[in-house]
Amino acid sequence: MDRREEILIAASELFRENGYHASSMRDLAKRVDMKGSSLYTHFKAKEEILWEIVSKGADAFLRSAESIDQALNAKDKLECLIQGHFDVMTNELTNATVFFNEWRFLPDDLKAEMIKRRDRYEAHFRQAIQQGVDESVFKTDDVKVATLFVLSALNWSYQWMKQDGPKALPELIDYYSSLIMQSLNYKA
Amino acid sequence: MDRREEILIAASELFRENGYHASSMRDLAKRVDMKGSSLYTHFKAKEEILWEIVSKGADAFLRSAESIDQALNAKDKLECLIQGHFDVMTNELTNATVFFNEWRFLPDDLKAEMIKRRDRYEAHFRQAIQQGVDESVFKTDDVKVATLFVLSALNWSYQWMKQDGPKALPELIDYYSSLIMQSLNYKA
DNA sequence: CCTACCGATCGGTAGG
DNA sequence: CCTACCGATCGGTAGG
């Protein structure tokens, strides 16, 4: 693994623990045994580091959603979306947490780019729910609000997920998923 | 309204927009037409300001939950809890947002105090859901996870709630509430 | 509530 | 990747 990647991992952990603005370049340098000024051979600015981490988090979510077979029926599709969301949470917890907590500190143009990606992710969920309504397996009066609801329940999970969480996690996720299905009035 | 209160309101808005660590005492002073040093006649430290705002947010949620009639049946109780949550979100959006985003920057002892209050709030929801299971109006295999699910869906809402939101908000909240009820398999 | 000031630290650059 | 350094700004105090 190259040095740049090592620094990004250390930065992700640091930002997760202390937040972007409470983390200094010198703090970060200490974690990778460098002097603060040497970080600038790998990155143009502190903001660039934030961007790379946030971007990595967002891409993990998007790739997960985009890898799902579009031919699936609505129920399976939504279940894959939910499982994928938790997979990203599990495998990329640090980047994902920084993504949720710190993306708002990006400069305006990069912030706009993140909003675009977030909207694309949301569209996958809305499409699956709409498909379920069309297939008459979901029953909901308002697909937009239902989508908001499902994504809210998922997005907050970074608050209670822990690195190396309990073995019980797979069952928890299954049950969480079934609660979402029930909220959409799932009928086989 | 006394000066101290005015400063707290300005600080809440400032922290909401820029985050606690990216807001300086001089930024805050400008918003209330003072010099930075003069803020220290009202507050001992910057941290004290954060504590007051976060504390106000948390108390609003707790008071809402604790004002609910314990004699209510489970469905009505949970609906009051949900409505109360959104009332706080509406009336105290700024303090609530700072509460969610910035409470982790409090010193350890105050952080522990906030966790206590959050646990007390959560207990109200768990109790209502458990009561519903006992009354056979809710059906859920795992009250703990169901509580986590409901609170996740509610807690994330600060992300999409806006000050002076759309007139449609009451209907949105009603529908959001019905999604939660369905997730708990509500049967009258 | 102000002016004046403190030491510490910030992100970042120059030059090697 | 380092040393040495920059101007700017930080939270906070003294003294009035």
Image: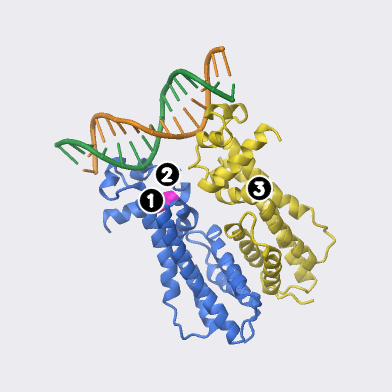
Chain colours: A yellow, B blue, C orange, D green
Which contiguous range is marked in magenta? B10-15
Res. A188 image quadrant: bottom right
Same chain check for tags 1 and 3: no
- Are circles 2 and 1 on residues that touch, CB within 8 Å? yes
Above/below status of B65 relative to A6: below
Number of other residues with Cα within 10 Å of mark 2, as a class: few under 14, some 14 to 19, many 20 or more: some
Above/below status of A187 relative to A146: below
**Residue in front for this viewpoint, B45 or A112:** B45
Determine which residue is flagged by label 1.
Answer: B11
**Left or right: where does residue C5 sit relative to residue A164?**
left
Q: Is residue A181 visible?
A: yes
CA distance separating discs 2 and 1: 9 Å
Determine which residue is flagged by label 3.
Answer: A57
Amino acid tagged 3: Gly
Above/below status of C6 relative to B181: above
Chain bearing tag 1 is B
Please tell me whether mark 2 sits on a helix, a strand or a loop: loop
Same chain check for tags 3 and 2: no
**Left or right: where does residue B91 sit relative to residue A78?**
left
Of callouts 2 and 1, which one flags the residue occurring earlier in the amino acid sequence? Answer: 1
Amino acid tagged 1: Ala
- The dot on residue A98 is none
- Magenta stretch, main secondary structure, is helix
Chain bearing tag 2 is B
Determine which residue is flagged by label 2.
Answer: B23
CA distance separating discs 3 and 2: 26 Å
Amino acid tagged 2: Ser
**Left or right: where does residue B112 sit relative to residue B161?**
left
